Image: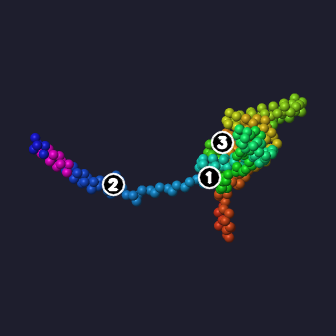
């Protein structure tokens, strides 16, 4: 049995060596390929030099932005805006810091309480230290007595926190970029106003809307109808309208329907306002103004002897299709 096993093992090793030698010979052999139109034969080989180089990847520097008419929401033109203005990556840490920074700096910090040295009362000891069999006591202004001062009570203080201007500006544009990528940033033409229908003036002249309550009811119903038609109303998370200054018709109309939207000018907008509602409807000039105010990280303050060498900030608002 042992001799048969040794003989079988030798035959297996011999066949293995023959197969490996055959494989080496096949690898060294090149297959000739003969062209059909000529007698020239070539070898089937592959070289890294014949492979086409991959094209260099260049990230986009601009993003498209549609400008709409208000309140019809009809597209008017297509513009290109810088990615550093409207396409920054989401930074939740910066947004959180900005919202906390704004909230802390809006706290008044005027709460104040009186200590035992500020309440009204005499500083005389109310009873002797010993001899009465009761606990010792000081004056009536003691914090443990009714009407006394308060221990560790609030005093006027500043709750404000610090945040660098550049980080705050990045958070501003990050909030705008977040709205843009989600399709929740609607940019309208300048002069955004809410026109009233012609029948409103007719009804006022005919005396059908002779008091303020009926007029406000008509305006609120008209405003809700416009917002619901454009999907800007209550069912879509309310909307924030941002203009360059006060609008005589738009602001009072939105004040009548606070559950549907609110109107603000550029002076009152902060990062939290850009994140709380479902839609942001902003004028084109107002958006440019907000971006110009919050791009300190993109504009250098270094003095250049040759102004031509001074780097220019990213440009936005170039018309592509009109």
CA gap between label 3 and label 1 equals 17 Å
Residue 192 vs residue 106, the one in the foreground: 106
User: Can I make out residue 150 in this image?
Assistant: no
Give the structural element (helix, strand or loop) at label 2.
loop
- Residue topped by disc 1: 83
Give the spatial CA distance, label 3 vs label 2.
Answer: 57 Å
Closer to us: 225 or 105 = 105
Determine the secondary structure under disc 3. loop
Residue carrying label 3: 184
Picture quadrant of residue 44 = bottom left
What secondary structure is the magenta-colored segment mainly? helix
The answer to whether one can see residue 280 in this image is yes
Q: Does the magenta-highlighted stretch encompass residue 21?
A: no
Q: Which sits earlier in the primary sequence, circle 1 or circle 2?
A: 2
Q: Nearer the viewer, residue 208 or 91?
A: 91
Mark 1 and mark 2: Cα distance apart in space = 48 Å
Q: Is residue 134 above or below residue 30?
A: above
Which portion, as a residue range, is magenta? 7-17
Q: Which residue is mark 2?
A: 44
Which mark sits nearer the N-terminus, 3 or 2?
Answer: 2
Marks 3 and 2: CB-CB under 8 Å?
no
Residue 261, position as x, y percentages in the image: 73, 38
Residue at 32%, 53% in the rendered image: 33
């Amino acid at each position: 049995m042992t001799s048969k096993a040794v003989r079988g093992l030798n035959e297996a090793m011999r066949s293995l060596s023959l197969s490996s030698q055959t494989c080496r010979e096949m690898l060294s052999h090149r297959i000739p390929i003969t062209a059909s139109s000529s007698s020239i034969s070539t070898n089937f080989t592959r070289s890294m030099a014949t492979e086409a180089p991959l094209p260099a990847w260049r990230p986009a520097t601009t993003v498209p932005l549609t400008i709409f008419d208000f309140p019809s929401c009809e597209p008017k033109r297509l513009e290109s805006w810088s990615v550093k203005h409207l396409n920054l990556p989401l930074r939740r840490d910066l947004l959180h810091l900005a919202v906390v920074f704004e909230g802390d700096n809006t706290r008044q910090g005027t709460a104040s309480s009186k200590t035992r040295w500020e309440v009204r009362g005499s500083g005389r000891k109310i009873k002797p230290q010993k001899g009465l069999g009761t606990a010792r006591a000081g004056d009536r202004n003691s914090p443990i007595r009714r009407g006394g001062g308060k221990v560790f009570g609030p005093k006027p203080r500043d709750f404000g926190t610090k945040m660098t201007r550049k980080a705050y500006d990045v958070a501003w544009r990050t909030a705008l970029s977040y709205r843009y990528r989600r399709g929740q940033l609607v940019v309208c033409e300048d002069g955004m106003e809410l026109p009233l229908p012609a029948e409103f003036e007719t009804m006022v002249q005919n005396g059908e809307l002779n008091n303020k309550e009926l007029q406000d009811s008509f305006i609120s119903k008209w405003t809700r109808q416009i917002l619901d038609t454009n999907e800007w109303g209550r069912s879509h998370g309310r909307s924030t309208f941002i203009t360059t200054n006060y609008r005589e018709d738009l602001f009072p109309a939105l004040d009548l329907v606070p559950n549907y939207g609110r109107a603000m000018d550029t002076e009152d907008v902060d990062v939290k306002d850009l994140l709380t509602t479902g839609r942001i409807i902003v004028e084109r000039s107002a958006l440019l103004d907000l971006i110009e105010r919050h791009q300190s990280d993109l504009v250098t303050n270094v003095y250049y002897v040759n102004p031509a060498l001074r780097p220019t900030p990213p440009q936005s608002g170039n018309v592509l299709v009109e």
